[in-house]
Amino acid sequence: MNDLPNHFDAAHKVANFPSIKPRVPERRLEERRTYRTIWISDVHLGTKGCNHELLIDFLDHTDSDTMYLVGDIIDGWRLKKKVYWPPEHSDIVWRILKRAKRGTRIIYIPGNHDEMVRPFSGMNFGGVEIMRAAFHDTADGRRLMVLHGDEFDTIMLAHRWLAFVGDALYHVMMKLNNWVAAARKRLGLPYWSISKAAKNKVKNAVEFISKYEEVVARAAAERGVDGVVCGHIHTAEFRSFEYGGKRVEYWNDGDWVEGCNALVEHADGRMEILHWPDEVARRNRRESDVTPSVPEAA
Ligand SMILES: [Mn+2]
């Protein structure tokens, strides 16, 4: 437990917010895009899998009236085994608390990896409201149910074997993913997720995801809402279903381990899944476009 003081120090720093400064300095507020709502989930703070660099970049380039943290924000399962908490993870917590302080409504719906937060549902910590699930009304009048999504795991019993095989394989793949990402970065190549590419090729995984999406959408239809927003399966997606002549939308906000996605609602109620590595690549291209060309020597 020689890592404990370090961990304690992180908690102490968060408690002393905002007297402390983040290690990665915040960008100017004027540079941010504003949305009505932002949903993110499956950040897995406390694990090496968390892509904190891209998430800090995302948080520094966006703002919203409301922000939903749709579960698995902190990975309590991994932290129980081994304490891993780099300063950038505190920076993320700092940025979320700072948003709350600036007036963003923050709703934190714990998932299965941060289930230790679930008993605090109904409470408010430094402007962060903790809820078991929520209903969100879009600007154009749709009612969406927001939950993490592990609630449907028991219904997916037939696919349980996949979860067992998946977990072991997943950690091997994540280690490989970090290694490839670091190598690609050194070579100046854009971020690319090995596990995401592999997952797309595995037929069973595709079937599992497809079935999961149907189960969740059906549950939303049964509750009479217009749609559902969830996370959990690390696969950002939009699908439209029809049950008894009524349209039901399925939105998954993805994750910050593999895909690095966020779901956003624009001022008019239009929703969009952002794939942040693409947004960064686009921004870098724009920046290189505006760089004046060096005149050639005569
Ligand atoms: Mn989960």
Image (spheres, grey):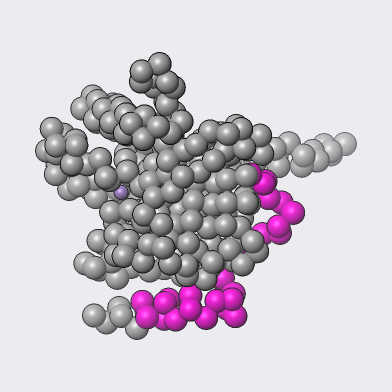
Above or below, comparing residue 175 to residue 125 in the picture: above
Dividing the picture into quarters, in which one does residue 160 lie?
Answer: top left
> In the image, what residue occupies the spot 81% across and 40% down?
292
Image location (x, y in percent) of residue 92: 50, 62
Whether residue 296 is visible, yes or no, is yes
Above or below, comparing residue 177 to residue 83 in the picture: above
Above or below, comparing residue 192 to residue 126 in the picture: above
Image location (x, y in percent) of residue 98: 59, 66
Q: Horizontally, is 72 left or right of 23 in the view? A: left
Image quadrant where one finds the C terminus? top right
Viewer-proximal residue among 41 and 230: 230
Viewer-proximal residue among 225 and 152: 225
Image location (x, y in percent) of residue 199: 29, 33
> In the image, what residue occupies the spot 53% across and 58% down?
106
Image location (x, y in percent) of residue 86: 41, 68
Whether residue 260 is visible, yes or no, is no
> In the image, what residue occupies the spot 39% across and 50% down?
133
Q: Is residue 16 magenta?
A: yes
Image quadrant where one finds the N terminus? bottom left
Q: Horizontally, is 36 left or right of 146 in the view? A: right
Q: Horizontally, is 11 left or right of 19 in the view? A: left
Q: Is residue 157 magenta?
A: no
Viewer-proximal residue among 288 and 143: 143
Q: What number of labels is visible? A: 0
Viewer-proximal residue among 144 and 288: 144
- The residue lying furthest to the right in this view is 298
- The residue lying furthest to the top in this view is 245
Boundaries of the magenta span? 7-35
> In the image, what residue occupies the spot 16% across and 34% down?
159
